[in-house]
Image (tube, helix red, strand yellow):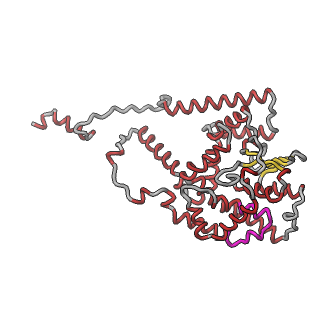
Amino acid sequence: MSLQLHVWGPGLGLASVDAECLASIAFFSRFVDAGEYVLIQSSPSAVPTHQLPALYDVNTQSWHSGFPSITHHLQAILILPEVQQQPTRKTRSDAVAYASYLAQHALPLITLSLYVSSANYTTTVRPAYSAILPFPLGWTEPPALRAAMVRRAEHLGMSSLDADADAEREENAQRAEAAAGWVQVPRGLLARKRGVGELLAPEQKARIRLEGLAREVLDVLAAVDWDGQDGAMQCLAWAYLALMLVPRVPRAWLRETMMRDYEGLCAFVERSMERWFVDEVQALPWSDKKAQDGVVRVGGRFANGLLGDVPGLGQAWRRWLARRRGRGALKMDGEGSGELLRIAGAGVVLVTSALLWRKIPQFGAPVQIWQREIPSFLGIGAAGLMLSGLAGSDAWI
């Protein structure tokens, strides 16, 4: 097999959890003989290009990353009559415009559904990545990927869907108030009945706006005859639409909007899936091993992820690593293996130290605040202290 396609592995009911990886798999399934290629479950940290999908051509010993680059390479080395029809200037410009629209508008919509929504990410997406990645990369790579995806959707102003971030901000605010010397009133004393709006999930509160954002994108996509596009564009559009329709998530606002108002797009997704994937996803030519799943290499990838997230050190580490990669891949000789092992050991020490530091009071802080517990009288705190003082004085005589 002369072609090795490295992709994010299967999950969410599809052959891949990533749009471009899914489009590449569909393209290979349609136009390349099964005996000519192999699919390898991977992640960006496992390939020299640090981007998925990535194609390695054994014959030319070359790497190609991204769906456009991969399809262009295949058209150059293989006879693909269905794809190699000479496009006109209009069809070329249309293809560029459609691909750009999918990346700039459809992808943020998928991001809102699968990554920004805490309920969907926690219950469905994160377990899918954990099943794909070798241990312990599930601790480092999915959070970093989620953060990168969320940044792509920041302009939509829907960060409130991330309930995890809201809880973290609230905890940080409480810690800051405690450090500043504010008296913390137990929440039970201020408990009140919550209205219906406070009981709704963030997606339910923002349902009208989310459906509005979805319609703005889906109206444009529904106006295109995707069956009339070339093979590559059909695969790319199908991949984005499939990630909107197929995943079964707890907050299925995007899927429900498609099924209710865009029957044509749903039919295109289902029809294409039946034609292009005759067999089950597991029947595709998957490699038995995941890319670079050796202990040393996985340890190095894990340590790289940890060091890249260390405050104050992460940015410098990523710059150094980029320069190192620019000079060539690290050879897996004795010296390289020893260096990766040392990095992995440093990563373990950092994780352990971070976990312990969160449990130990920060005695190294420049300012220490010590608060004496205020005695209570009749259970009413400082006011009770004043009353108890008056009770012991002549003011009550």
Query: Which residue is at the front of the view, 10 or 129?
Result: 10
Residue 209 x/y as whole percent:
53, 65
Query: Which residue is at the front of the view, 136 or 301?
Result: 136
Q: Would residue 217 be found to the left or right of residue 361 on screen?
A: right
Asked if the stretch drawn in magenta spans residue 222, the answer is yes
Q: Residue at x 12, y 34 (%)?
A: 394
Q: Residue at x 54, y 51 (%)?
A: 118
Residue 212 x/y as whole percent:
56, 67
Query: Which residue is at the front of the view, 251 or 146?
Result: 251
Quadrant position of the C terminus in the picture: top left
Magenta region, residue range: 219-238
The answer to whether any part of residue 385 appears in the image is: no
Q: Is residue 356 above or below residue 117?
A: above
Q: Main secondary structure of the magenta part?
A: helix
Q: Would residue 364 be found to the left or right of residue 381 on screen?
A: right
Query: Which residue is at the front of the view, 383 or 196?
Result: 196
Q: Would residue 78 be found to the left or right of residue 38 on screen?
A: right
Q: Residue at x 49, y 49 (%)?
A: 166
The answer to whether any part of residue 367 appears in the image is: yes
Residue 84 x/y as whole percent:
87, 64
Quadrant hosting residue 381? top left
Q: Is residue 234 above or below residue 115?
A: below
